[in-house]
Image (spheres, rainbow, N blue to C red):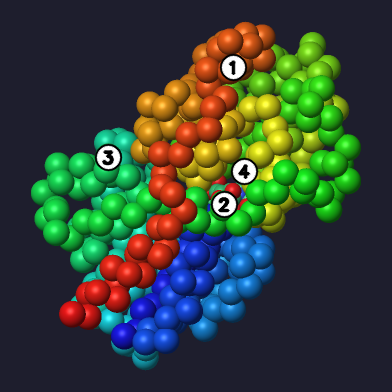
Amino acid sequence: MKIALIFGTRPEAIKMAPIVKELKKQEDIETVVCVTGQHREMLDQVLEVFDIKPDYDLDIFKPGQSLTDITVNSLEGIEKVLAKEKPDVLLVQGDTTTVFSGALAAFYQQIKIGHVEAGLRTGNIYSPYPEEANRKMVGTITNYHFCPTDANRQNLLREGYKDSDIYITGNTVIDALKYTVQEDYVFEDQVLNDLDYDRDKIILLTSHRRENLGQPMRNIFTAVKDEIKDRPEVKVVFPIHLNPKVRQVAYEVFEGMDQVIFVEPLDYLPFTNLMNKVYLVMTDSGGVQEEAPSLGKPILVLRKETERMEGVEANTARLVGTDYQVIRDNLRELLDDKEAYNKMAKSQNPYGDGTAAKQIVEILKNLKN
Ligand code: UD1
Ligand code: UDP
């Protein structure tokens, strides 16, 4: 049996890594790893951490790339790889443009598709954009849907997918996380070691969503700035995405603020260990919404909708959107109201038990019979 995996961005690589590792252990499965290189530095960081050497690297990245650039260049490259390798199944993960192109290329060659992290939905085609559309389009041509949770399965059943094609496996991000967090972790970046995580209130902030670029992101950053500026004990660590459109607004709004510490995108190990030490997480990321609950960290989700309601339902996450006042009010409450904070700071793991990759590989092996 031959299984190919295609991925291209940081989160896909993190969530595919446990599956690559598990597949490589199987003597009766040949594994082919192809990366599109939709991300360059941020993808390479993850490949290095997990020691994955791709068989194919399409290297499509170009600064300022449009959705069309990514789609067209990936599709062309993936077509050739699939025509040469002829895998029995192609695995794609999540909802990026690499995922859409990968699945489409496989469909054109009638290669079976396994979609990892299937069934996530907000119900709003423009939020997250273009991810909600990508996951719906990929679902249509997918043969095996690997859902993290039963809520994801229910979404697919509502859309008319056959239950026999749906598997609940948990999310592979929990598999990845299990091996990274250590209580005595020491950062390479001394700035992160020097922070007083017990005495001060350290906030981890990330933001990169396309639909938040521009004014929504400006609202988020301004709300954080105004709420913390008279609280010297509050500091923000912002590992800032490489997108210049994010950087421009962030540098402008936080200019001259010593309480905000910008760091380059962190490797997965320091990032998750930082998350494990901070007081609070503020993010519009998908993956971070899954990781923070299992580390017992309250999260303010900086999005109008989320496809990851499990954290909200478990009361470890609050969906606060991008409205200036709503963000300030929620941040103030979590900084000042110990009881409200403690209610959210509890370890919850709605996204599986860290065996998702094993389960997915077992399912693939049994497809032979
Ligand atoms: C992409 C995904 C998004 C995912 C995110 C994870 C799409 C449409 N979007 O968004 O779903 O949540 O990745 O981070 O697939 N850049 C670099 N180097 C890198 C990566 C990005 O310089 O290694 C800069 C470039 O200027 C690039 C910009 O960031 O043009 C945006 O990258 P892109 O992959 O187009 O979209 P993301 O916003 O990263
Ligand atoms: N992450 C990382 N370094 C960072 C920021 C995030 O390793 O500086 C990891 C994080 O732990 C999570 C994933 O990247 O697993 C999330 O990626 P991102 O927020 O870019 O994308 P999304 O999950 O929103 O698609």
Q: Picture coordinates of residue 27 (x, y %)?
A: 42, 86
- Which type of secondary structure does the marked residue at label 3 adopt? helix
The reply to whether the C-beta atoms of the residues labelled 1 and 3 are less than 8 Å apart is: no
Nearest to the eye among marks 4 and 3: give it. Answer: 3
How far apart are the alpha carbons under marks 3 and 2?
22 Å
Residue 341: numbered disc: 1
Among the 4 quarters of the image, the one containing residue 124: top left
Q: Residues within 10 Å of mark 2 (few under 14, many from 20)?
A: many
The reply to whether the C-beta atoms of the residues labelled 4 and 1 are less than 8 Å apart is: no
Q: State which tag comes first along the sequence, 2 or 4.
A: 2
Above or below, 103 against 338 in this view is below
- Which type of secondary structure does the marked residue at label 4 adopt? helix
Q: Which residue is mark 3?
A: 151
Amino acid type at mark 4: Lys
Residue 245: numbered disc: 4
Q: Residue at x 88, y 46 (%)?
A: 190
In the image shown, does 106 or 91 lie closer to the viewer?
Answer: 91
Q: Picture coordinates of residue 69 (x, y %)?
A: 46, 64
Nearest to the eye among marks 2 and 4: give it. Answer: 2
Residue 177: numbered disc: 2
Amino acid type at mark 1: Tyr
In the image shown, does 183 or 267 lie closer to the viewer?
Answer: 183
Task: Determine whether the beta carbon of the residue marked 2 sits less than 8 angstroms from the nearest atom of ligand 2.
Answer: yes
Task: Determine whether the beta carbon of the residue marked 4 sits less than 8 angstroms from the nearest atom of ligand 1.
Answer: yes
Is residue 255 visible in the rendered image? The answer is no
